[in-house]
Image (cartoon, rainbow, N blue to C red):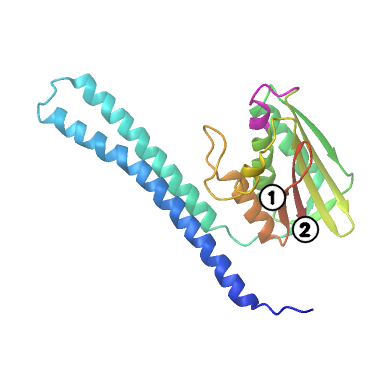
Amino acid sequence: MAALIDVEQEERVAEARVTAELVEVLGHELLNGLAPIASLSESALNVLNGAHDDPDLLREILGVLARRADGLQRFAEAYRTLARLPEPIRRPVSVREMADDLARLFASRWPAATLHVDVQEDLSWALDRDQMHQAVWALLQNAAEATQVDRAPSGAVRLSVKRADETLVIEVADDGPGVSPADAERIFRPFVTTKPNGSGIGLSLARQIAHAHGGALTLERTPATVFRLSLP
């Protein structure tokens, strides 16, 4: 039995679905950001018009207003970053050297966590170093943050890089509480996060960088939390 599928139609449907999701997220975040700004602006006007003769109240309102506006600006900049990712410029890169740089950054940013690095020696790969550094750093940050939740057993993160046939395989694992099946289907969507202070940008951007290199970023179905980034 054979089934014929209109591939172009399927691609158009998938693209429309992704676009609709992005627009929905963008609208939701903008409304959430603008609603308190409008309310705070009205409160500030009431103070200026004499409804409340309290300079400290006006200062407090303006402070919150400034922080909300700053948060909305950061969201807009993050959205633009996702939309304008440049084409990767591939050059041979020492994977060991890149991993060492990431390890030093990790030790500085997360002194309470332990990073175990296992990199195949003398391994070089053609990739965009800046973009791949950003992608793997996002995975490491995600892993480190996971170890801070629910008092993970050891706060340990593992970074391994190896060659498997004609593929470079980068894995980041942690001993955090894991990702629920429901969240596993949505954590790669832009601005979706399971962390209280998360932006929802890191995993989405990391996957976009992997795709731009012709590769893939997946969450492996294992007892531990393992993200696998594969590059041809």
Front residue of 81/144: it is 144
Q: Is residue 157 above or below residue 121?
A: above
In this view, the residue in front, 75 or 17, is 17
Who comes first in sequence, dot 2 or dot 1? 2
Please state which amino acid type lies under the numbered disc 2.
Ala
Main SS class of the magenta portion in the image: loop
Kindly identify the amino acid type of the residue bearing the numbered disc 1: Met
Residue under the point 32% across and 30% down: 64
Callout 2: helix, strand or loop?
A: strand
Relative image position of residue 195 (x, y in whole percent): 56, 34
Q: Position of residue 163 (x, y in %)?
A: 87, 52
Looking at the image, residue 209 sits to the left or right of residue 33; the answer is right
Report the magenta residues as a range: 144-153
Q: Secondary structure at mark 1?
A: helix
- Distance from the alpha carbon under mark 2 to that under mark 1: 11 Å
Q: What numbered label is drawn on residue 132? A: 1
Res. 11 mark? none
Q: Residue placed at 61% from the left, 72% from the top? A: 10
